[in-house]
Amino acid sequence: MKTSIATIAIAGDLSKNLTAIANAGFDGVELFEQDLIAFNGSPQRLGEMVREHGLRIDLLQSVKEFGGLPAPLRARGFDVVERKFDLMQALGTELLLVSSCTPAASLGGVDRLASDLRELAERAARRGLRIGYEAVSWARIVADYRDAWELVRRADHPALGLVLDSIHVLADALSPEHIRIIPADRIFHVQLADAPLLRMELEYRSRNFRSLPGEGGLALADFMSAVAATGYDGPVSLEILNYRFHSGLPRTIAEDGYRSIVQLMDQVRTRQPEMVMQVPEMPAKSRAEGIEFIEFAADAEKVAGLERLLDTLGFVPLAHHINKRVALWRQGAINILINTEPKSFAHSAYTMYGTSVCDMALLVDDAQAAAARARALGANPFNQPHGKDELDIPAIRGVRGTVLHFVDQQSALGRIWETDFDLSLNGGQDISGVGLTRIDHISQVMDHGEMLTWTLFYTSIFEMSKMATINTVDPGGRVYSRALQSDDGGVRIVLNGADTQRSFSGRFDADSAGSSVQQLAFACDDIFATSEALAARGFEILSIPQDYYLDLAARCALDASLLERLRAADILYDEDANGAFYHLYSRPHGEGFFFEIVQRCGGYDGYGAANTPYRLAAQKKLKSKRGTSG
Ligand code: MG
């Protein structure tokens, strides 16, 4: 498979962007006329610069309107394109994209348009060049790829073919299935872009909301399956136009882009196993079954605060690592590690972020396969030396440099606790604690612009679905939340993206200079019993404003005694068609890290989003109090 990306997807210095594009694994680029205008040098030099980065120029986009003009305008139209041919020859690219938009004076007429295309192809062929004709979904005359194909078929010239762009092919819910009858050698180039399924004007959507495959709602796997069925083996290119990308880092956009193409084509391969395009081999998506452990980086001198906190939560210090200064605390099926090892990855994390979550391990069906898939999709591997008799647990880098380990039950990794930890001292202890049973979810904080990156990261490696994004309006700015979860809810990760650093999530983000895990939520079976047990151990529960319970009484038909129990224990409540949700929060620790305790009843599948504004307000109140008291 040949991969390509339009240079306009990434803003900023072209030379730096080309480096990012090449490093991410792309083979080529699409250049736009704007690249030539902005470039401080000749077209020849620009072409050389692209090739010096090891990239091809797959095509030039610069003819926006062509065809159907009456004389004498017609001759002028050809002169304009001849000038583009000069540029192409100087650049060293052979394919010109011609869009189906016609000038206002264009008369149309299927034979007139086909004959213009034929003449254009003939002129191109004389120079060793080719024309790719693209149906643009808002074009006045040829808006449908099937009509574009009819013109190309009638023009019948070997130097004329189609450019298929998913955003146009799938516009207005057009079916991509007709692609299957187009001969592969008549498809010169394929462009990919996703887009949200919002009702909006097609041109506006295409110019502002094109996103990476997998981020929107278009049926891209259907589109590419139809393309693959033709036997097409040319470039698959990302033509992304989105104002959000213009504030992103070139490296991130290029890496996300490459990952999005590869994971899409991996999906297409399962439907179309005999396709000609070669996609990097990789194991299937991993089933994420649970979070096996969460690891905190801490400093040996200051670790007591974290230990006290875990103790009030009912965790028991159970064992030590056989080689490192890592302690295992356990309650129910929850494993928390505290790493105070000097000269380790955790120590660097501590130096940067203070006491914080530096690592987590997912329990998957096959840990080696999960790591191999992640690497094939461009994730950065993580290695650190492991000591004698210790397991080598596969790992990659996750959000903001945190580490993501993989363990499974089918290999020696299933005995991680018996192998890497000395359970002999306290192994028999009661670990029922205050009734916390498992990790319900974790929340990771990031800039809003990074949410797409990490959504793609998790959903391309694991069988996880993304839930709808929920916006919470916070007085300091907007917070966007999106939950990613495995089908059975065994792993739930909530991504919180903040627009500004004034919102609570944003402030947490700024203060802790980049540590990502903001919240750990533990599940229990009886939140009233657990909250009493927590209070008895001195755990500080976040006080919820009384207004909340007045609002709750109006919103949900709860009986008065239940409402009173909730109020007395600072427990929040939510319900949906399938069940109910009870939750409470700790006070924020450090720079805003907090715990949540939840109880899910029936099939409730949400996260109590309706209660978020009250939680944020309660946390803010505490923070400002703390601020005034010094
Ligand atoms: Mg296009």
Image (cartoon, rainbow, N blue to C red):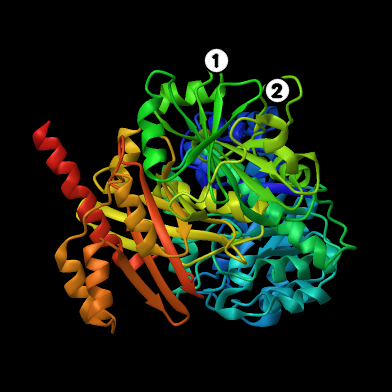
Nearest the viewer among 88 and 582 is: 582
Apparent side of residue 562 relative to residue 425 in the rendered image (left or right)? left
Q: Quadrant of residue 420?
A: top right
- Residue 612 position in % (x across, y down): 30, 61
Reading the image, the residue beneath label 2 is 386
Report if the CB atoms under discs 1 and 2 are less than 8 Å apart: no
Question: Which corner quadrant holds the C terminus?
Answer: top left
Badge 2 crowding class, 10 Å Cα cut-off, few under 14, some 14 to 19, many 20 or more, is few
Instruction: Confirm whether residue 157 shows in the render.
Output: no
Q: Is residue 134 left or right of residue 278?
A: left
**Residue nearer the viewer, 430 or 460:** 430
Residue 233 horizontal/vertical position (percent): 83, 56
Residue 166 percent across, percent down from the top left = 63, 66
- Residue highlighted by disc 1: 343
**459 lies above or below 467:** above
Q: Residue furthest right?
A: 274
Q: Residue furthest left?
A: 628
